[in-house]
Image: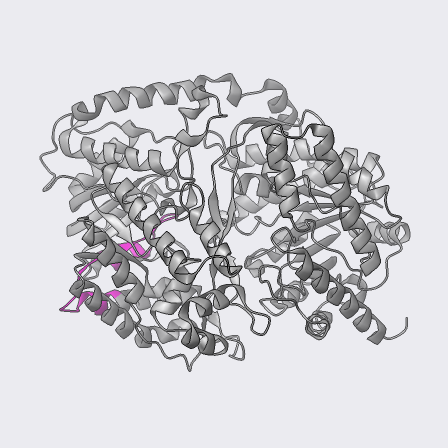
């Protein structure tokens, strides 16, 4: 598709504006993370934390304005999570946290996010199909909503004081309720959406307050509407925006959706009395254009067109996007230009990367580069392509460079992937036969204890890694430090009584990056930080070309750990789907093809671990549920290649080698059949915050293999007591028989400190022994 005109479009009633829905929060040097963690440790005062946050907001807004963004977002900045901020906005504070919030709102806010020793935090799960985690609202029939728009008003006032046109961004009322769960003690079948009529007046008061504070437009994000929605949910959406649109004293309303096709919700919103819609028009949501034409467009309304992908890091095809924008001009009163979603999901600035080949760097666009693309497209839409011919020429050259690069294609890798057969992705014996051989080889007790893989990444480890990069120590000195750390981890687990040990992963910077740095086709960034949750930031590698494994990646360290103990030590790998999901994956071939390449590279590692004597190998797939398409119609194709990739990784081992996998912080009920199809011998799952819900989901499905629903929430600093872990374990036994139940934390321990790790694992092992002794004698 090509732009309709090379001159100023006559159909445009006003110059197109450039905008974004959100921006990375952390700062170029992760200043927000450092300030918040300093506050938690008592080294930073509340006033100093607020000052740092305010400076970061101002810096972001000024940066956006200088880049050509005409309308900046406010309210997208958060100390921890924007859904948690919405919970504060609408006053839906859980009963157990109200005292803390009343005493100190900032400490109470962090208590809801992280918990305290006395009080559990809110449940945390993935934000749609991203690796961002949000805090799940807890609601019930007795929930009382009260408007508290102070934070929104404050940020709007800050931006307007800088002379900027600002648009507050809120999680919309329908999405907020659809993301919520019944509060503890509330019937599991309670539907939070029944609270809509109670919630809407709170949104109305918030909108009125924002208008009084100077807001011309307010954005209400409704990404839940790109999922399959029932007629009742669509009717609730129509009612919500009929009522909010009918308010007389309100700002203009822009309802935003992203991450996919709006589908049946599009005509509902198009007919509602709101003033504009923001839609995703990237390749994955291209059907929005046809759907918009089918409903007759948006006459009299504003359309914000998300033509720059807000979730990947590849440069935009500017000519193609201009063609889409040109088509959209006839479908709305005005068309403005944006990214497809908040830029929260990409790193800040590709220009900071000094270690990436400049030829490849031309192909990359992080948040700063994407804002420039948005501004360029808005200029081209308003003034015609002649006004941006230089940018278009450079963009064409960069796209051609990538398409022709030998980096992207390895004939040997493609030939191997093309030769894969169904038999390559099947174990040599069924589970019922394998488990007999594994129990004989491993000799484990009932309710065996283990951990997920990583142990605390201490300051000493981080210093050693930095010293190695800076040349202050050599490789021998660094490896000596790693060996000492492994010895400490193994010794602690043996003394504590853990049954299946791990080496603690001290050599690994990140569970994806560590492997990416050793596989061909991947690129590692130095500054590509992206928020995963709270103050947890990761640097997703860039998957740019065909994948292979030049040499073993983990065998040396696993074998060293095994030499220190007679107990089994797990080999630890990250699975192929997670390697894709937590990377910025190439967009020039089907994901299933890329997954198969990664699986074959990991299969080589699994085979080498087994050959070195490793009896238990864990291949983590925490992203299996996260990457599930948002529409049910797309599930089958995805799950077919995703489960095949896992089996291709793991199916070459002997029957008596036990294959584990791990998943965390997702809605597992949607993929229980896929979990079964993985054919892993043991799966460990997050379960502590959700009170063992997944154990019952597995039981309902009839899951026949071994499982370890977590009894320790590792994303909170609190130490679970022995009694607490034992209670969860007894709950698990109601769903999973003792001969198939494992005892483990929810997830890896990398983010925890050693004192809480020691205490929590000691309690976990004691709880397992206590409950083991309660079992009837066999």
* Residue 578 at least partly seen: yes
Residue 265 percent location from the top left of the image: 32, 57
| Side of 599 where 564 appears, left or right | right
Residue 422 percent location from the top left of the image: 69, 36
Residue 82 figure quarter: bottom left
Question: Which residue is found at the position 48% from the left and 32% from the top?
Answer: 586
Front position in the image: 237 or 375 = 375
Residue 382 percent location from the top left of the image: 15, 34
The answer to if 204 sits in the magenta stretch is: no
Question: Which residue is found at the position 45% from the left and 32% from the top?
Answer: 587
Residue 314 percent location from the top left of the image: 41, 32
Does 678 appear above or below 590? below
Q: Which range is magenta?
A: 241-270
Q: Quadrant of the N terminus?
A: top left
* Residue 267 at least partly seen: no
| Side of 3 where 463 appears, left or right | right
| Side of 70 where 595 appears, left or right | right
Report the label total.
Answer: 0
């Amino acid at each position: 598709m090509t732009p309709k005109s090379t001159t100023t479009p006559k159909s445009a009633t006003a110059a197109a504006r450039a905008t974004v829905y959100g921006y990375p929060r952390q700062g170029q040097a992760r200043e927000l993370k450092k300030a918040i963690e300093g506050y938690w440790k008592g080294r930073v005062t509340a006033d100093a934390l607020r000052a740092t946050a305010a400076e970061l907001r101002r810096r972001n807004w000024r940066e956006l304005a200088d880049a050509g963004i005409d309308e900046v977002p406010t309210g997208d900045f958060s100390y921890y999570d924007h859904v948690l901020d919405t919970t504060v906005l609408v006053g839906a504070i859980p009963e157990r946290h109200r005292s803390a919030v009343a005493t100190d709102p900032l400490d109470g806010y962090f208590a809801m996010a992280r918990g305290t020793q006395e009080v559990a935090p809110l449940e945390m799960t993935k934000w749609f199909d991203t690796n961002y985690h949000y805090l799940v609202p807890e609601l019930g029939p007795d929930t009382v909503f009260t408007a508290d728009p102070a934070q929104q008003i404050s940020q709007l006032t800050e931006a307007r004081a800088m002379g900027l046109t600002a648009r507050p961004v809120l999680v919309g009322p329908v999405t907020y309720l659809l993301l919520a769960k019944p509060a503890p003690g509330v019937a599991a079948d309670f539907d939070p959406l029944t609270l809509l009529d109670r919630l809407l007046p709170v949104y109305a008061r918030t909108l009125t307050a924002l208008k009084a504070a100077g807001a011309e437009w307010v954005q209400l994000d409704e990404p839940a509407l790109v999922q399959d929605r029932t007629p009742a949910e669509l009717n609730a959406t129509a009612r919500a925006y009929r009522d909010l649109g009918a308010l007389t004293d309100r700002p203009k309303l822009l309802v935003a959706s992203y991450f996919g096709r709006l589908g049946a919700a599009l005509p509902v919103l198009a007919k509602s009395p709101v003033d504009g819609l923001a839609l995703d028009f990237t390749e994955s949501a291209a059907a929005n254009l046809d759907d918009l034409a089918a409903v007759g467009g948006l006459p009299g309304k504003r359309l914000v067109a998300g033509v720059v992908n807000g979730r990947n890091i590849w440069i935009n095809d500017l000519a193609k996007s201009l063609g889409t924008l040109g088509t959209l001009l006839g479908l709305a009163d005005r068309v403005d230009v944006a990214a497809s979603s908040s830029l929260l999901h990409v790193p800040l600035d590709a220009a900071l990367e000094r270690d990436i080949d400049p030829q490849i760097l031309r192909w990359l666009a992080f948040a700063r580069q994407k804002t420039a693309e948005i501004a360029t497209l808005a200029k081209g839409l308003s003034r015609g392509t002649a006004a941006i011919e230089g940018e278009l020429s450079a963009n064409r050259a960069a796209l051609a460079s990538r398409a022709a690069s030998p980096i992207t294609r390895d004939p040997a890798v493609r030939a191997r992937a093309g030769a894969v057969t169904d038999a390559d992705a099947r174990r040599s014996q069924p589970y019922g036969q394998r488990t007999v051989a594994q129990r004989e080889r491993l000799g484990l007790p009932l309710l065996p204890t283990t951990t997920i893989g990583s142990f605390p990444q201490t300051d000493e480890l981080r210093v050693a890694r930095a010293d190695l990069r800076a040349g202050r120590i050599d490789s021998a000195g660094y490896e000596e430090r790693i060996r000492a750390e492994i010895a400490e981890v193994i010794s602690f687990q043996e003394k504590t009584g853990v049954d299946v040990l791990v080496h603690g992963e001290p050599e690994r910077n990140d569970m994806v990056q560590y492997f990416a740095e050793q596989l061909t086709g991947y690129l590692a960034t130095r500054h590509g930080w992206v928020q995963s949750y709270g103050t947890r930031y990761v640097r997703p590698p860039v998957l740019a070309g065909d994948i292979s494994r030049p040499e073993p990646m983990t065998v040396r360290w696993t074998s060293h750990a095994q030499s220190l103990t007679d107990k089994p030590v797990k080999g630890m790998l990250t699975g192929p789907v997670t390697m894709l999901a937590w990377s910025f994956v190439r967009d020039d071939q089907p994901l299933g093809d890329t997954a198969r390449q990664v699986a074959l590279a990991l299969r080589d590692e699994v085979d080498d671990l087994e050959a070195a004597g490793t009896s238990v190998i864990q291949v983590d797939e925490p992203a299996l549920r996260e990457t599930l398409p948002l529409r049910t119609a797309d599930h089958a194709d995805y799950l077919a290649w995703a489960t095949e990739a896992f089996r291709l990784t793991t199916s070459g081992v002997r029957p008596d080698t036990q294959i584990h996998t791990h998943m965390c912080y997702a809605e597992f009920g949607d993929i229980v059949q896929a979990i079964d199809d993985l054919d892993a011998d043991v799966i460990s799952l997050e379960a502590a915050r959700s009170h063992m819900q997944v154990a019952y989901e597995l039981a309902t499905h009839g899951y026949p293999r071994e499982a370890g629903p977590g009894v320790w929430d590792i994303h909170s600093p609190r130490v679970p007591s022995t009694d607490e872990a034992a209670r969860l374990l007894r709950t698990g036994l109601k769903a999973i028989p003792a001969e198939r139940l494992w005892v483990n934390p929810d997830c890896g321990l990398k983010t925890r400190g050693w004192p809480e790790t020691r205490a929590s694992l000691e309690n976990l092992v004691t709880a397992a022994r206590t409950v083991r002794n309660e079992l009837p004698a066999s």
